[in-house]
Amino acid sequence: MLYPDELIRGIANASDELAPEGNASLNMFVFRKNPDRGDDTIEELSVNWCDDKEKAVAVIMGQLKPNGNMICKSGLSKQTKTVIRAMLVPCVTSIVSREDG
């Protein structure tokens, strides 16, 4: 499956998910179990793929409840999850607050 080159990620808690300097931190990319899935073998991270950037921005700016669409196997080691998260952080090219959007 081919994904767009860009994605948008909502920030639920800026004080936890952004570094003191205002850039993305590892906490922005935490995979969690979704109780609605009924499947303990998958963890997910909510993102919106920018196949249509205007719509993706509209969705994320109006989003009140998280939905997951980036997934990984449950049971990955903490080190492997940290490596995945550390690879995602430098990919953040901009951070837009609701007030700016």
Image (spheres, rainbow, N blue to C red):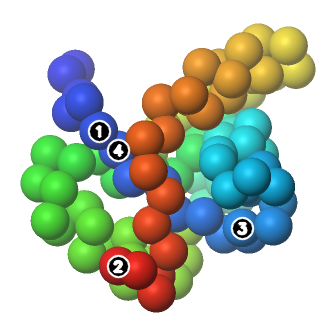
Question: What percent of the width, then of the height, locates residue 85?
Answer: 67, 28
Q: Which residue is drawn at 22% across and 48% down?
A: 50
- 9 vs 44, left or right, is left
Please tell me which residue lies in front, 28 or 19: 19
**Alpha-carbon neighbours of circle 4 within 10 Å: few (<14), some, or many (≥20)?**
some
Q: Residue at x 47, y 30 (%)?
A: 91
Q: Which residue is drawn at 14% across and 65% down?
A: 54
Distance, label 1 to label 2, CA atoms, is: 17 Å
Mark 4 and mark 1 in contact? Answer it, CB < 8 Å: yes
The residue that label 1 is drawn on is 6
Mark 4 vs mark 3: in front:
3
**Alpha-carbon neighbours of circle 1 within 10 Å: few (<14), some, or many (≥20)?**
some
Q: Mark yes or no: residue 38 visible.
A: no
What is the number of callouts on the image? 4
Q: Which amino acid does label 2 sit on?
A: Gly
Quarter that holds the C terminus? bottom left
Element under label 4? strand
Please tell me which residue lies in front, 48 or 42: 48
Residue 3 to residue 31: above or below: above
Distance, label 4 to label 1, CA atoms, is: 4 Å
